Image: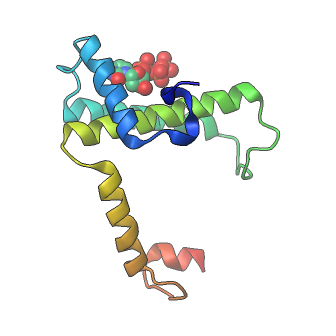
Amino acid sequence: MTKATEGASVTLDLLKEKMAEFAKERNWDQFHSPRNLLLALVGEVGELSEIFQWRGEVPKGLPGWKEEDKVHLGEELSDVLLYLVRLSDICGIDLGKAALRKVGLNAIKYPVGSKGSSKETKQQQ
Ligand SMILES: Nc1ccn([C@H]2C[C@H](O)[C@@H](COP(=O)(O)OP(=O)(O)OP(=O)(O)O)O2)c(=O)n1
């Protein structure tokens, strides 16, 4: 298995490099502007939503789903991730670093055992 096919060792940096290479080889850098990438990302989120649309609540692990539907789900999740990684790169944002920082901020905002006052926390109680 090559580095790119080992799912467990995939990093955001590797995906960033793969997307940059993909765009460069096709001379598509010109199209990968922040706005275009954001719209492409939102479009892929729509495609992802379509998979869940009208199914009702879906149990964790997707029991009973056809293999082809799971493969399709993986593809749409990947499109969202890839455009997000590319958008971050084009904007000069270190996504891994930013996400880790945000995890830290979330922990401060929602301390363990606390009953926060935000809408989200109320819904989880
Ligand atoms: N200008 C483009 C076009 C595509 N891609 C890459 C990123 C996504 O991972 C994937 C998106 O390809 P499509 O637009 O063909 O979308 P789908 O794969 O979802 O196909 P479809 O919309 O036909 O289901 O290809 C890209 O980087 N830049």
Percent of width and height locating residue 79: 45, 31
Percent of width and height locating residue 83: 36, 34
Residue at 27% x, 42% y is 88
107 or 121: nearer the viewer: 107
Residue closest to the far right: 64
Quadrant that contains the C terminus? bottom right
Residue 83 appears anywhere in the view: no
Residue closest to the far top: 26
Q: Using the rendered view, name the quadrant where residue 22 is placed.
A: top left
Compared to residue 122, the image places residue 42 above or below, namely: above
Percent of width and height locating residue 85: 34, 39
Residue closest to the far bottom: 114
Residue at 39% x, 42% y is 12
Residue at 25% x, 39% y is 89
Compared to residue 28, the image places residue 89 above or below, namely: below
Quadrant that contains the N terminus? top right
Residue 116 appears anywhere in the view: yes
Residue at 74% x, 44% y is 62
77 or 12: nearer the viewer: 12
Looking at the image, residue 46 sits to the left or right of residue 73; the answer is left
Looking at the image, residue 121 sits to the left or right of residue 125; the answer is left
79 or 56: nearer the viewer: 79
Q: Using the rendered view, name the quadrant where residue 40 is placed.
A: top left
Q: Using the rendered view, name the quadrant where residue 23 is placed.
A: top left
Quadrant of the rendered image holding ligand 1: top left
